[in-house]
Amino acid sequence: MSYNDKADAISKEEWLSRLEQFPFKQADMNRLIMNYLVTEGFKEAAEKFQHEADLEPSVELSSLDDRILIREAVQAGRIEEATQLVNQLHPELLGSDRYLFFHLQQLQLIELIRAGKVEEALAFAQSKLSESGEEAMFELERTLALLAFEKPQESPFADLLEQSYRQKIASELNSAILRCEHSEDSTPKMMFLLKVILWAQSRLDSRSISYPKMKNLETAHLEPK
């Protein structure tokens, strides 16, 4: 029997059984969850989990307050406020990370478009984003393309208006602040584990090996190959 034949014989039930037998410790899982909550700045959830899991976080939770204010401002579309808070906390950050600064300005442009302020949006793009550089040009073009539609939320570029896009930039900014503060973790360790899962599945796919695949990382649901 070939290796592939053996792999084909692995059912979803057997795969799950092997996963259940994997010798992981609940304490390790708890530390992984706490790392995610602290790194992403979810203070309230971290405080609750601290008591539920009887686990001390790696940092004082009060140190999350500034990052929480910045994240909340970005996720609420208050980009000017978020930018001012960042400049107060780390004046050098946005000057040294021009791509990050572009993303904040892009969000501000998106908010003007969302509010239907077309002339103001065009003026802002011309004065603030005209020299964004080649790296950001494609994203700028997609953003300005929203202006070509009477209902931007129904355009091919509507993803820029989704709350998830604000959250994406908020996480990018959060990681940059952590790096600026020389934090041990600027990205949740859980994200690295997810990348390992995707890498391992791509390797199995490249070898045409049949296995129950985790197609949805949000639900961790396994489906037969």
Image: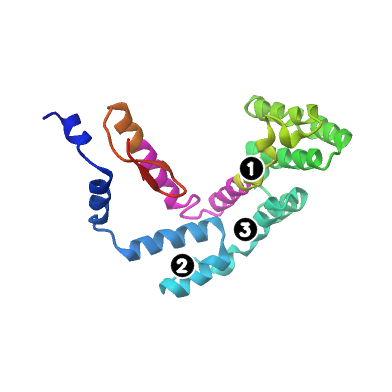
Q: Which residue is mark 3?
A: 67
Which dot, 1 or 3, sits closer to the camera?
1
* Identity, as a three-letter code, of the amino acid under mark 2: Pro
Q: Secondary structure at mark 3?
A: helix
Q: Is residue 184 left or right of residue 163?
A: left
Image location (x, y in percent) of residue 51: 46, 75
Q: What is the C-alpha distance between the residues marked 1 and 3?
A: 18 Å
Q: Residue drawn at (75%, 39%), measured in percent from left and top?
A: 110
* Identity, as a three-letter code, of the amino acid under mark 1: Tyr
Image location (x, y in percent) of residue 116: 84, 39
Disc 1 packing (10 Å; few <14; some 14–19; many ≥20): some
Indicate which disc, 3 or 2, sits on the residue closer to the N terminus. 2
Q: Which residues are magenta?
A: 170-199
Above or below, 181 relative to 164: below
Asked whether the residues under the numbered discs 3 and 2 touch, taking CB atoms below 8 Å apart as contact, a structural biologist would say no
Q: Which mark is residue 165?
A: 1
Q: Which residue is mark 2?
A: 57
